Each structure stands twice: as C-alpha cells, then as structure tokens.
Amino acid sequence: MTTFLITGAGSGFGKGVALRLAQLGHRVIAGVQIWPQVWQLRHEAEAAGVQLEVIKLDTTNEIDRAHAFSYDIDVLFNNAAIMYAGPATEVPESLWRESFDVNLFANIAMTRGFMPALVKKGAGKIVFVSSLAGFGKVPFLSPYAATKHALEAFAGILRQEVKDYGITVQTVNPGPYLTGFNNLGFESIYQWYDADTATIAAPPAYSEDDFPLTQYEPEQMVSAIADVLTGKVSAYRTMLPPEVEKQARADQAAEWDSTI
C-alpha cells in the first residue's frame, strides 16, 4: 500500500484527489489548513465510505509541519496554494509576501522536511501543483504567477538533483478549472483596492458566468493528478485541458519574437 501526504486537502483539487486515492485503497494523509476543515473532511470521508487520515497542516506553520514529518510516506503532493489578484504595482506588499510564503517557501519547507527519509529509503515521489500561470502572463495575476514561475524553477532543478537517489519529481499544471479558486482570487481584490487612490485600474470581481476564461469541470484534473501520483503517467509535466497546453506552448514560442 502506497502512503500519500497531500497538502491543501480541505478544498479543490486536494480534496478531490485525497478522496479518489482513498477510494483506490491507498493510505492517504490529508493535510488541511484549519481545525474546522479537519472535522469537515473526516465526515465527508466517512459519508463516502473511505478511510482518510486527516490532519491539521498549515504548511506555513512549523509545528504543523513537524507533526507531518513524523509520517512515513512514499509520495508527497505539494498542493496547497493561495491566489491574490490585482494590478501588479497596486497589490499590497503583505499579499505579495504571503503569496510567496504559501506557494513557494512552504513547498520548499515541506520538501526539505521529507527529503532525508526519502533519500534513506531510496525511493519516493514529489509532485507539485504548478499552474498554467507558471508559464503564462495573465494580466492582474502577477503575485500568483510569479510564485508559480519560481516553483517551476525549483521543481525542475530538484528533479535533476534527486533522480540518482530514486526520487522522482513531477508537476501538474491546471488551466482554469471551476473550483472557485479563480473567482475568489479576483474577488479578493476588493478587500483592499481603492479606485479613488489607485494608479492602475483593477478588473471587476467576476461571477462564474462572466469569468474572462473558460473554466472547466475539475473532474478531468482530479483524475489526471491521481494518475500522476500513482505512477500511471511518466511525463514530467501534465498540463490540462489539452487546448490550454496547446495555447501555452504557442504563447511561449511567440514570446521569443515579441517586440515592445
């Protein structure tokens, strides 16, 4: 039986993947950010008829991380993330720092904490949730995109450094899926943005119906992530849906010929 530890399992892809892996009979340690989510996810697992070991795991909290490191795992799924949107030069510095703390430094800390045990074991897998934003440059998503660009660099270099120790590294790169993550990221602007004092105009708080990008049903991504985690996919990077990957490749190629 393979043991998986998942961060950010209280919602979105993390929750879906945790339940899916448990349904497949794996041992799953599902880390959630706050205590109420522990209670909620345990009851959801019970209602679904699956076994989940749900723990409080705020990945920025040293106590929570130390507790997580006590588990003997085979696969680490670094999934927890946050999104703040807004004009790049208007987003408060505190939100920039929080974005990097959660989306980059906490991923590094989780990976560092489990690495000695995985190296000693001579086997293991680490999977990072990156994003289409790790390559694209979507206006008003600079804090989120910057963290994912940095995470791409970390994962790509780590992959080369640990391959001789029996440890594999992969990324999954979701496009826009309808989990609420994208809409709430844009909604967050209006907790701090003041149009009367701002230099750069902000986008509106989009509803599900008027979001500027097509958002897809998350089941496709949940299934793909489960396949990556269980070793059914050998590709280093999995970006979905296919049309988003195609556009990302085209955008990257076009950037080489871009002019001011």
Image (tube, rainbow, N blue to C red):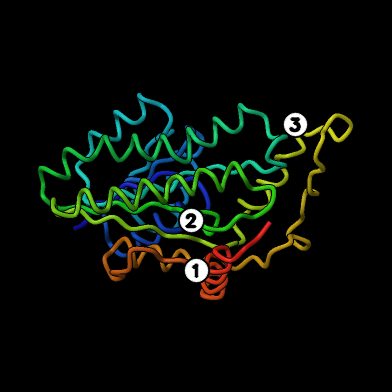
Mark 2 and mark 1 lie on one chain; the one further toward the N terminus is 2
Left or right: residue 105 versus residue 12 is left
Mark whose residue sits in front, 2 or 1: 1
- The answer to whether marks 2 and 3 mark residues whose Cβ atoms lie closer than 8 Å is no
Figure quadrant of the N terminus: bottom left
Q: Check disc 3: other Cα within 10 Å, few if <14, some if 14-19, many if 20+.
A: few
State the image coordinates of residue 124 (x, y, percent, origin top left).
Answer: 20, 52
Figure quadrant of the C terminus: bottom right
- The answer to whether marks 1 and 3 mark residues whose Cβ atoms lie closer than 8 Å is no
Q: Check disc 2: other Cα within 10 Å, few if <14, some if 14-19, many if 20+.
A: many
Name which residue type carries label 3: Trp
Task: Write down the residue under mark 2.
Answer: 13
Q: Nearer the viewer, residue 155 or 219?
A: 155
Name which residue type carries label 1: Leu
Q: Check disc 1: other Cα within 10 Å, few if <14, some if 14-19, many if 20+.
A: many
Mark 1 and mark 3 lie on one chain; the one further toward the N terminus is 3
Left or right: residue 124 versus residue 80 is left
Identified at 45% across, 52% down, the residue is 14
Left or right: residue 255 versus residue 184 is left
Residue 165, numbered label: none
State the image coordinates of residue 48 (x, y, percent, origin top left).
Answer: 43, 59
Task: Write down the residue under mark 1.
Answer: 240
Task: Write down the residue under mark 3.
Answer: 192
Q: CA distance from mark 1 to mark 3?
A: 32 Å
Q: CA distance from mark 2 to mark 1?
A: 13 Å
State the image coordinates of residue 88 (x, y, percent, origin top left).
Answer: 68, 40
Name which residue type carries label 2: Phe
Mark 2 and mark 3 lie on one chain; the one further toward the N terminus is 2
Identified at 80% across, 40% down, the residue is 200
Identified at 49% across, 39% down, the residue is 37
Q: Nearer the viewer, residue 134 or 30?
A: 134
Mark whose residue sits in front, 2 or 3: 3
